[in-house]
Image (tube, rainbow, N blue to C red):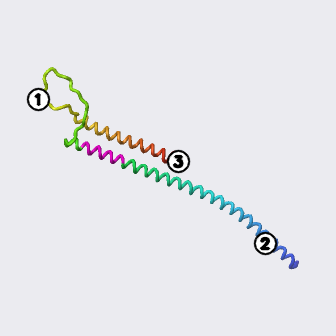
């Protein structure tokens, strides 16, 4: 059985048209998938930019508050050294109960005990730490959470 040439041409044309239709449908599906991936990529890029800016803001807050806390601690340490050396004195409000006998001539004025003095400086340091932590949290809320 021999096929005349026009039937071969029709078969080839049908095959070519079928392949073109297949590739056109595949091309549409691939374009749709590409568009979805580009949209997803844009969203992820936006999220990454937001995360990076948030991390920078947190790092800036941390650096600023750590510097403030270190400065406050250095100031407290300087004061403590000055008090220990006698260059400065802690001012306190104290009253002495009146005793029946007259005062001794070489008696010293009221003074904190060494333990109370250490506790005073420890308390000041803890107050500064708490203030710095609270201010840092407030900055974090204002600059990171609310934005």
**Residue sitting nearer the eye, 36 or 4:** 36
Percent position of residue 75, x then y: 29, 45
Horizontal side, residue 119 vs residue 143: left or right: left
Of callouts 1 and 3, the N-terminal one = 1
Residue occupied by mark 2: 16
- Quadrant for residue 125, please give it: top left
Give the residue displayed 76% in from the left and 69% down from the top.
20
Residue occupied by mark 3: 147
Marks 1 and 3 sit apart, C-alpha to C-alpha, by 68 Å
Residue 122, compared with residue 98, is above or below; it is below
Marks 1 and 2 sit apart, C-alpha to C-alpha, by 122 Å
Residue occupied by mark 1: 105
Of callouts 2 and 3, the N-terminal one = 2
Overall secondary structure of the magenta section? helix
Q: How many marks?
A: 3
Residue 54, compared with residue 95, is above or below; it is below
Q: Nearer the viewer, mark 1 or mark 2?
A: 1
**Residue sitting nearer the eye, 41 or 120:** 120
From this viewpoint, which residue is outermost toward the left?
105
Q: Nearer the viewer, mark 2 or mark 3?
A: 3
Q: Nearer the viewer, mark 1 or mark 3?
A: 1
Horizontal side, residue 46 vs residue 117: left or right: right
**Residue sitting nearer the eye, 4 or 67:** 67
Horizontal side, residue 75 vs residue 66: left or right: left
Of callouts 1 and 2, the N-terminal one = 2
Give the residue displayed 39% in from the left and 43% down from the top.
132
- Magenta stretch bounds: 68-80
From this viewpoint, which residue is outermost toward the top?
100
């Amino acid at each position: 059985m021999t096929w005349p040439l026009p039937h071969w041409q029709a078969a080839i044309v049908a095959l070519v048209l079928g392949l073109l239709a297949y590739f056109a449908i595949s091309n549409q599906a691939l374009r749709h998938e590409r568009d979805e991936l580009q949209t997803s990529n844009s969203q992820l890029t936006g999220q990454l930019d937001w995360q990076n800016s948030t991390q920078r803001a947190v790092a800036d807050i941390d650096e600023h508050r750590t510097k403030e806390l270190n400065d406050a601690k250095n100031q407290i340490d300087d004061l403590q050294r000055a008090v220990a050396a006698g260059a400065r004195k802690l001012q306190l409000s104290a009253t002495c109960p009146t005793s029946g006998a007259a005062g001794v001539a070489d008696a010293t004025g009221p003074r904190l005990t060494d333990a109370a003095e250490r506790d005073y400086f420890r308390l000041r340091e803890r107050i500064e730490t708490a203030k710095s932590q609270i201010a840092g949290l407030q900055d974090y809320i204002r600059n990171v959470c609310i934005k």
